[in-house]
């Protein structure tokens, strides 16, 4: 089942969209009798990863769908409002007094431009991917066909926030083998059309030994590099998980920089 408002996929038994807070009505019995029965959701920001949330202000606690961290709803609302507004903020008849001078002392901020509009790279990467489904019809006088295209659309910011890729021995060998085949084909063309016939056998022997030795050296060097990268990959992945990005200046930094 998909949300009629934002189009994100939601569980069949869900009453609310976790992404935008839209009320999901699948049966007439789900229709609210009065305005008091409608759950009013307000925007908030996860106190751990900075993900944009929509929470019920009547609840005391909630769980972030991005990092599964439990948080106090009032703190998440407070964090969101500080990131978007200044001064006194009215939230569900409760007034929150915000002092802009103390923002940097109370909340995380970008170490470069001191903006509080920051977010974890993992959340930016997850939020930047959207499942799409396009349908089109080809109506002609002989036949009518319907085409469906599905895929994943991602933003440029999500591409820049992608996690580090773990190197593969197999991919390295296949890539080098592909270039080896190309070099061999070029060698055959040169010997067949550019080298005199009386020198073909001698040149072919020297070239074959030279090419084989060069590619063995490159294969050894690349596989050694992959082996060394695999040793530091867990550290790079952990650093990515702790990294944040400033949506104002684009600066990427780890959370430890702020502690």
Image: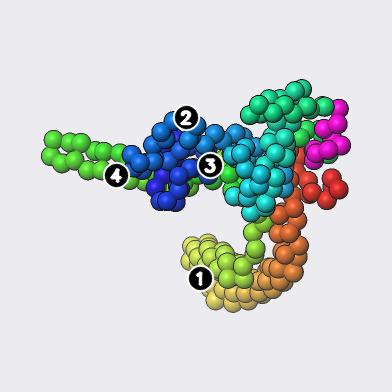
Q: Are marks 4 and 1 in contact (CB under 8 Å)?
A: no
Alpha carbons under labels 1 and 2: distance apart = 93 Å
Check if residue 107 falls in the magenta segment.
yes
Q: Residue furthest top?
A: 87
Q: Identify whether 206 is placed above or below 121.
A: below
Point out the frontmost of discs 3 and 2: 2
Quadrant of res 118:
top right
Q: Which residues are magenta?
A: 101-109
Alpha carbons under labels 1 and 3: distance apart = 72 Å
Q: Residue furthest left?
A: 142
Circle 3 sits on which residue?
Answer: 19
Alpha carbons under labels 4 and 1: distance apart = 58 Å
In terms of sequence position, does the residue under pointer 3 or pointer 2 come before the other? 3
Circle 4 sits on which residue?
Answer: 147
Total residue callouts: 4
Q: Identify whether 175 is placed above or below 75.
A: below
Point out the frontmost of discs 1 and 3: 3
Point out the frontmost of discs 1 and 2: 2
Circle 2 sits on which residue?
Answer: 35
- Residue 59 visible at all: yes
Nearer-the-camera pick, 189 or 148: 148
In terms of sequence position, does the residue under pointer 4 or pointer 1 come before the other? 4
Circle 1 sits on which residue?
Answer: 197
In terms of sequence position, does the residue under pointer 3 or pointer 4 come before the other? 3
Q: Main secondary structure of the magenta part?
A: helix
Residue drawn 42% across and 35% down? 32
């Amino acid at each position: 089942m998909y949300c009629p408002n934002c189009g994100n996929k939601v569980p069949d038994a869900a009453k609310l969209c976790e992404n935008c807070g839209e009320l999901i009505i699948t049966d007439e019995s789900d229709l609210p009798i009065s305005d008091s029965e409608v759950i009013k959701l307000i925007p908030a920001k996860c106190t751990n990863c900075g993900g944009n949330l929509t929470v019920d202000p009547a609840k005391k606690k909630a769980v972030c769908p991005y990092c599964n961290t439990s948080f106090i709803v009032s703190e998440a609302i407070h964090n969101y409002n500080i990131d978007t507004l200044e001064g006194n903020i009215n939230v569900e008849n409760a007034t929150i007094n915000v002092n802009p001078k103390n923002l940097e002392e109370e909340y995380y901020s970008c170490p470069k431009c001191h903006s509080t509009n920051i977010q974890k790279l993992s959340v930016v990467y997850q939020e930047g991917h959207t499942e799409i489904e396009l349908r089109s019809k080809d109506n002609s006088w002989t036949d009518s066909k319907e085409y469906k295209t599905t895929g994943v659309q991602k933003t440029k910011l999500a591409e820049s926030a992608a996690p580090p890729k773990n190197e593969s021995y197999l991919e390295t060998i296949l890539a080098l083998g592909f270039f080896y085949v190309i070099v061999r084909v070029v060698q055959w063309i040169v010997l067949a059309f550019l080298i005199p016939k009386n020198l073909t056998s001698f040149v072919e022997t020297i070239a074959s030994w030279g090419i084989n030795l060069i590619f063995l050296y490159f294969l050894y060097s690349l596989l050694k590099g992959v082996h060394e990268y695999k040793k530091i990959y867990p550290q790079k992945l952990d650093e990515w998980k702790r990294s944040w990005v400033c949506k104002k200046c684009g600066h990427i930094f780890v959370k430890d920089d702020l502690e």
